[in-house]
Amino acid sequence: MSDRFEQFIAEVTSAVSGSNDESVVLPQVRAAMARLVAKDDWLPADKAQADPQRYQQNLLHCDAGGRFSVVCFVWGPGQQTPIHDHLMWGVIGMLRGAEICIPYRLVDGKPERHGDEIHIRPGDVGAVSPTIGDIHQVRNALPDRPSISIHCYGGDIGKVERHSFTAGSRTAERFVSGYSNVAS
Ligand code: FE2
């Protein structure tokens, strides 16, 4: 992939090699992500294709030691996630189009909205983790074209069992997301 992406991988590798402390690693990954999504000139076209059936989660890189993974989300018009958690840190950078993120928290076992909708535009960077807030719902903000965001997680996110939630319900569904471009 491009020099810009290779530089990002080098910076995140350095960050996770230097510390296991999320409060140390996250600012470094956020800064690296801001540089990565500052310019939309590096993502290969085959990773940027929307699917009319389902939003795409294309694996771009997984650390050999499983310490982090990088995933490209491609949203078709109208596509959205369920309310879900991650169970690890994640840094999100908007590359193309726009997203709307709704933060949630569990109250008495039920997901409740926690704060305002966040409108995410190209170049914006956000983060999630069990420490800083791990539950949200995300959708494409554009009704007529795809949007693309780049996600870097503190583990092999596609292989981890985590949870989706339904508003008003205490029942959490377990799921493993996998990757759209990797056979499971
Ligand atoms: Fe998420």
Image (tube, grey):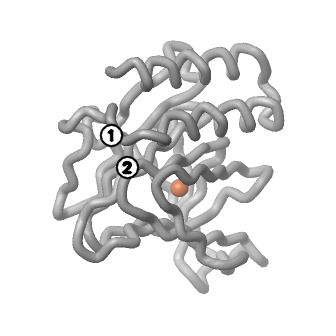
* Left or right of 57, for residue 38: right
Classify the position of the C terminus by image quarter: top left
Residue at mark 1: 58
What kind of residue is marked 2?
A: Phe
Q: Position of residue 159 (x, y in %)?
A: 46, 36
Task: Identify whether 104 is placed above or below 156.
Answer: below
Give the secondary structure at mark 2.
strand
Q: CA distance from mark 1 to mark 2?
A: 6 Å
Give me the residue at 56% from left, 82% from top: 167
* Left or right of 144, for residue 133: right
In primary-sequence order, the first of circles 1 and 2 is: 1
Label 1 close to label 2 by CB (< 8 Å)? yes
* Left or right of 93, for residue 76: left
Task: Identify whether 97 is placed above or below 40.
Answer: below
* Left or right of 93, for residue 181: left
Residue at mark 2: 73
Give me the residue at 52% from left, 24% from top: 8
| Number of residues whose C-alpha sits closer than 10 Å to that of mark 1, classed few (under 14), some (14–19) or many (20 or more) | many
Q: Position of residue 17 (x, y in %)?
A: 70, 14
